[in-house]
Image: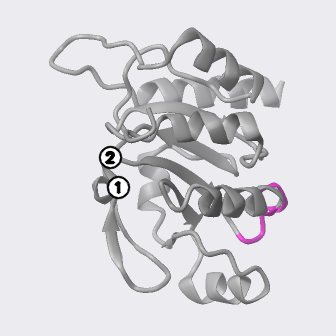
């Protein structure tokens, strides 16, 4: 019962991110083949256009970024925590995806409520190189309605959310990597 309630809550929050563009519902720019691929990978694809909420945050290296800085790129917004075992399970795959796409698919990991100090200590043991934000005050977490970890939003180069994965995934799976690469404007 709890899982069902959690699923319903997640569905409401996911659809709650929905925006209409100029008062009209626009379909998500995904082919039936792409939708099938996402479904096989247990990634939810919205039926209408959902614009990713912009935010600013500070990376572990001190750089202040905004989501719009990555406009024109495919972005995986990955919400995680150092204590989350399922998060740690998928992080090597996220690292592989980050390297295999030469940063053209941006993995932006957002740590839920943890300090930079704690994340730095974690990175000493697990030297991941993709960008990490310490969302200490949980503003980004709240903006996206994150309740469970890990959760990953797939954002198209135009800023549309094209998928949401709750729980760990094999982000290095060849068909998923090819799908993400196909969304890169120069490869599309």
The residue beneath circle 1 is 70
Q: Residue at x 38, y 33 (%)?
A: 160
Mark linked to residue 82: none
74 magenta-colored: no
Residue closest to the eye, 183 or 1: 183
- In the image, residue 74 lies at what x, y percent? 45, 45
* Mark 1 neighbour density, 10 Å: few (under 14) some (14–19) many (20 or more): some
The quarter of the picture where the N terminus appears is: top right
- Badge 1 element: helix
Q: What residue occupies the far left of the structure in this picture?
A: 22
Q: Is residue 158 above or below residue 5?
A: below
- In the image, residue 12 lies at what x, y percent? 53, 24
The image quadrant of residue 38 is top right
Query: Marks 2 and 1: CB-CB under 8 Å?
Result: yes
Residue closest to the eye, 21 or 149: 21
Q: Is residue 55 above or below residue 179?
A: below
Residue closest to the eye, 76 or 24: 76
- In the image, residue 43 lies at what x, y percent? 67, 29
Q: Is residue 80 above or below residue 12?
A: below
- How many labels were placed on the picture? 2
Q: What residue span does the magenta drawing correspond to?
A: 82-88
The residue beneath circle 2 is 72
CA gap, disc 2 to disc 1?
6 Å
Q: Residue at x 69, y 22 (%)?
A: 37
Q: Residue at x 45, y 69 (%)?
A: 137
The quarter of the picture where the C terminus appears is: top left
- Badge 2 element: loop
- In the image, residue 36 lies at what x, y percent? 67, 15
Q: Residue at x 48, y 63 (%)?
A: 138
Colour convention of the picture: one colour
């Amino acid at each position: 019962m709890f899982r069902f309630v959690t699923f319903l809550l997640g569905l409401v929050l996911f659809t709650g991110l929905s925006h209409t563009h100029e008062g009209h519902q626009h379909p998500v720019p995904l082919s039936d083949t792409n939708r099938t691929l996402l479904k096989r990978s247990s990634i939810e694809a919205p039926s209408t256009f959902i614009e990713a909420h912009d935010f600013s945050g500070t990376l572990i290296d001190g750089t202040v970024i905004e989501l719009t800085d990555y406009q024109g790129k495919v972005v995986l917004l990955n919400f995680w925590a150092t204590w989350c075992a399922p998060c740690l399970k998928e992080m090597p795959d996220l690292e592989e995806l980050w390297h295999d796409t030469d940063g053209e698919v941006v993995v932006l990991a957002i740590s839920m409520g943890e300090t930079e100090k704690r994340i730095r200590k974690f990175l000493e043991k697990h030297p991941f190189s993709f960008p990490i934000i310490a969302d200490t005050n949980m503003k980004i977490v709240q903006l996206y309605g994150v309740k469970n970890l890990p959760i990953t939003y797939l954002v198209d180069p135009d800023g549309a959310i094209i998928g949401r994965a709750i729980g760990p995934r094999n982000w290095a799976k060849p068909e998923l990597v090819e799908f993400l690469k196909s969304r890169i404007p120069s490869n599309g």
